[in-house]
Amino acid sequence: MGDEGHEGRQCDAAVSLAFSVLGKRWNGMILDVLRGGAMSFVELRRGVGGISDAVLSDRLTELAEAQLVVRRVSPGPPVSVSYELTDAGCALLPLLTRLGEWAAAHLGAAAR
């Protein structure tokens, strides 16, 4: 196997890491809502219908730690906080779209 086995393990680890963030409920929706540009917490909560404030706050923290979302504080007055996609978050959007298309085409029957 040599290097090929090592590269496969690295790929598996990278995919596992990606899904540890992206596989959590709401994260994909939050990223998709932010596709439209920077938003306040309240705008995000409206855009991601059904999410609680506590869960949205937790997910935004996770996405910021993964460097997919940035939290910006404007000193005001009044102080305002907004969230927007980083370059890495923007680069991820086409992949999420393709993954959704793949899932609809190949997993749609399994979900019914």
Image (spheres, rainbow, N blue to C red):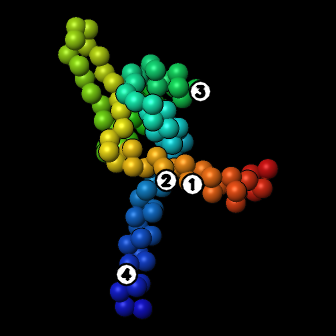
Sequence-earlier tag: 3 or 1: 3
Residue extending furthest top? 77
The answer to whether marks 1 and 2 mark residues whose Cβ atoms lie closer than 8 Å is yes
Nearer to us in this view, 34 or 73 = 34
Residue pointed to by mark 3: 50
Q: Secondary structure at mark 4?
A: helix
Q: Residue at 33% x, 24% y: name it.
A: 82
Which residue is the extreme one toward the left? 75
User: Which numbered disc, 3 or 4, marks the residue that appears first in the sequence?
Assistant: 4
* Residue to which mark 2 is pinned: 95
At label 3, the amino acid type is Gly
Who comes first in sequence, dot 2 or dot 4? 4
The residue beneath circle 4 is: 6
**Relative to 24, 91 lies left or right:** left
- Residue 59: give x, y in percent of width and height: 43, 37
Q: Position of residue 111 (x, y in %)?
A: 74, 51
Q: Residue drawn at (59%, 27%), measured in percent from left and top?
A: 50
Kindly identify the amino acid type of the residue bearing the numbered disc 1. Leu
